[in-house]
Image (cartoon, grey):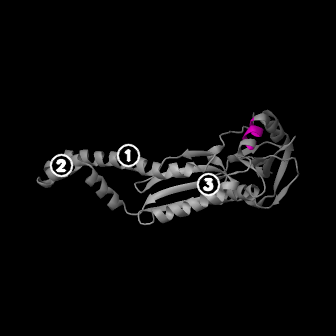
Amino acid sequence: MREEGKYLYAIIGTNEERNFGPIGLGGREVLTIAYRDLSAVMSTAPLRKYEVSKENLLAHERVLERVMNEYTMLPVRYCTIAQNTEGIRQLLERQYQQLKYLLRDLDGKVELGVKAFWRETDLIFQEIVDENEAIKRQKAEIARKSSSQTHPQRIAIGQTVQAALEAKKEREGEQIFKVLRRLAAEHRLNPTVGDKMFLNAAFLVDRAREKEFDDQMERLSLQYRERVKFSYVGPVPPYNFVNITLHPEE
């Protein structure tokens, strides 16, 4: 028989015994194990490294979403497994004060995520050319020559355009970011991906201001409707604002 351990999902601030039901990885029961006034949310699991599969990730997220509905929560990194119940209690004891501080800082707050994408990249690249006299001159010079004569110039223009694109992303992203960060207790800027995305941000918002944040997103969506498509998600587990690594094996 394969030895079983305790798979960790989250830390919450309670000593109440809870059973969240069979929603864990592999349909396992999700329970709590307490130390003082902290509890680890866990399920039994084989002692092995879990593959990063869609099924497992969805199960992990499903547990976090369920717990988050009732508690302020510190999400634990995917595939964190303790040997046994005593190992979990020792973990909570070792990091008790740090975990308490983090839970206090997150209490009454939610993480909201905002990404912004340009609707038409062709329009953006044309704006870059129109705004940059050097690029316009280089393109005019290339147009008068054969392609075999202009390969180095084309590479140089491509590099100039890419640099201008990154600068444009930063400028336009900052315009939206500065409006939203006023409503947040904390905020994080994350890297963008691809040419269309120019903002990728997370905001830690007091629950009392969540509706205000929603309303501001509606106004931004209306203001930029011809130019920008927004992806707005949340509340989600506060991964962007929890930076702890639990080591059950220590």
Q: Which amino acid does label 1 sit on?
A: Ala
Q: Are marks 3 and 1 in contact (CB under 8 Å)?
A: no
Q: In this view, does 163 lie to the left or right of 75?
A: left
- Disc 2, SS: helix
Residue 88 picture location, percent across and down = 81, 41
Residue 180 picture location, percent across and down = 55, 52
Q: Are marks 3 and 2 in contact (CB under 8 Å)?
A: no
Q: Is residue 16 left or right of residue 167?
A: right
Mark 3 = which residue? 112
Q: What residue type is labelled 2?
A: Arg
- Disc 1, SS: helix
Q: Distance between the residues labelled 3 and 2?
A: 44 Å
Q: Is residue 183 left or right of residue 22?
A: left
- Disc 3, SS: strand
Pick whichever of labels 3 and 1 is earlier in the sequence: 3
Mark 1, other Cα within 10 Å: few <14 / some 14–19 / many ≥20: some
Give the residues drawn in magenta, as a range. 98-103
Residue 76 picture location, percent across and down = 70, 46
Q: Is residue 20 left or right of residue 102?
A: right
Pick whichever of labels 2 and 1 is earlier in the sequence: 2
Magenta segment main secondary structure: helix
Pick whichever of labels 3 and 2 is earlier in the sequence: 3
- Residue closest to the eye, 149 or 174: 174
- Residue closest to the eye, 118 or 64: 118
Query: Which label was assigned to residue 137?
Result: 2
Q: What residue type is labelled 3?
A: Leu
Tell me the residue at 35%/50% (across/down): 165
Tell me the residue at 21%/51% (across/down): 136
Mark 1 = which residue? 167
